[in-house]
Image (tube, grey):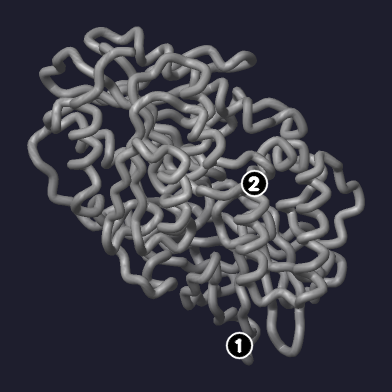
Amino acid sequence: MRTFLIGSVLALVGLSTSAAQVPDHLKGDWTGALTPQLPLILHIGKDVTLTSVAQSNTPMPATLRQTEGHIIIELPAFGVKYDATLSADGRQLSGGFQQGASTRPVILTLGAPVPAAAPAAPVATSPPLRQDREVSISGGQAHLYGSLTTPDQPRAGPAVLIIAGSGPTDRDSNSSIPGLRSDTYKMLAAALAERGISSLRYDKRGIAKSGPAMVREEDLRLSTYVDDAIAWARFLKNQPGVTCVAILGHSEGALIAAMAAQKTPVCGLISVSGAGRTMGAVMREQYAATDLPLPTVLQINSVINELEHGRLVPDIPVTDAAFNPSVQPYLISELSVDPSVEIKKTATPLLIIQGDNDVRVTVPDARLLSAARPDAKLVILPGVNHVLKTAPRDRNGNVATYANPALPLAPGLVDPIVEFVSGLAPR
């Protein structure tokens, strides 16, 4: 399943080399590690694939091209690029592994054993003050799964539904994409429980344990995710001791939360790192920031324009999986939806949270949302990035935090959420 990753730096464009054109000396399994916790296997043969052993351990389709002495491996669907040179003995590839603006040096060795993943650094934890149990609801052809986290001694009150952001993101805010493992939602659920608030977070349809519930990619729409959020909100409302539900959406989940809040009774809405502009505007901005040639950017803008007007583009002028024909119906359903307009339609109490070191969504986005609902409470968190961790403004250092689940949530994040939720009453 290809899942379109909204909010990421989008895939680089290049011509791939077919397997038949790959020189024999490059064929085989090349092994190395992105980080000590993330071993990689690059397979070059009839097909070219990249596998992140410690994450999904599922081979991801890749392309290979050679130019001016460089061997370039790309995963267009995930915006991943590995630009390497071959050693004199033909046994090592040395280069930079790039995702978005983050680049890490990676050496891959032909035929070497797969390195064992180093254990994650231990994280100091307080004594357990919470219970975490798996729950499920009907998802049509298969069940959807999530985690209900409650205080060790629960009391009656509002509960929080946590909606994940874009891409193949699971209930804990982790992804099958290499370099995206932050545990953000898992940490947030634990922090809320330790402050007396229950929460529910879930694997998106088609992701992790909810994978079997995936509809055909051609049939996926933004409304599919909205309907799932509504179903989970109703499930949470029926749990013992839950007086009402506040929906917390992160990134693309903030838009889903705003749309769900219009269709089901909730007592609060929390937008975290949510865009204030249409996805079409965001995508144009992202592509303009890449090093793609101007004619390619103009071609992409033309495709976006067609999709915004509800027209499929059967002949894609660029080699970018983001615009595959099977993905286009989903894009059409979302590209022109204005988050500011959707949030203006809501009437429930609203909290808007935005980090000022977020390289995906900006403070002006949060202010656009706030302008649409002047009665909302707006909280700007200094030094906080898109995955809600304290991070440097430098883009490489900022994005590097996405792969470090040992980093705690940023100070100042949990307090305004607890204060907001604690003051909610059933509506």
Q: Quadrant of residue 100?
A: bottom right
On the rendered image, what quadrant is the N terminus found in? top right
- Determine crowd level at label 1: few under 14, some 14-19, many 20+ residues with C-alpha closer than 10 A: few
- Determine crowd level at label 2: few under 14, some 14-19, many 20+ residues with C-alpha closer than 10 A: many
Task: Judge left or right: residue 277 versus residue 127.
Answer: right
Can residue 308 be seen in the rendering of this structure?
Answer: yes
On the image, the x and y values in percent for residue 379 come to 29, 48
On the image, the x and y values in percent for residue 318 come to 82, 62
SS at mark 1 in the image: loop
Q: Marks 1 and 2: which is nearer the front?
A: 2
Residue at 46% from the left image edge and 27% from the top image edge = 346
Residue 87 has which mark?
A: 1
Q: Amino acid at mark 1?
A: Ser
Identity of the residue furthest to the left in this view? 127
List the residue tagged with mark 2.
Answer: 4
Q: How many marks?
A: 2
On the image, the x and y values in percent for residue 75 come to 66, 60
Residue at 86% from the left image edge and 42% from the top image edge = 311
Can residue 37 be seen in the rendering of this structure?
Answer: no
On the image, the x and y values in percent for residue 300 come to 78, 61
On the rendered image, what quadrant is the C terminus found in? top left
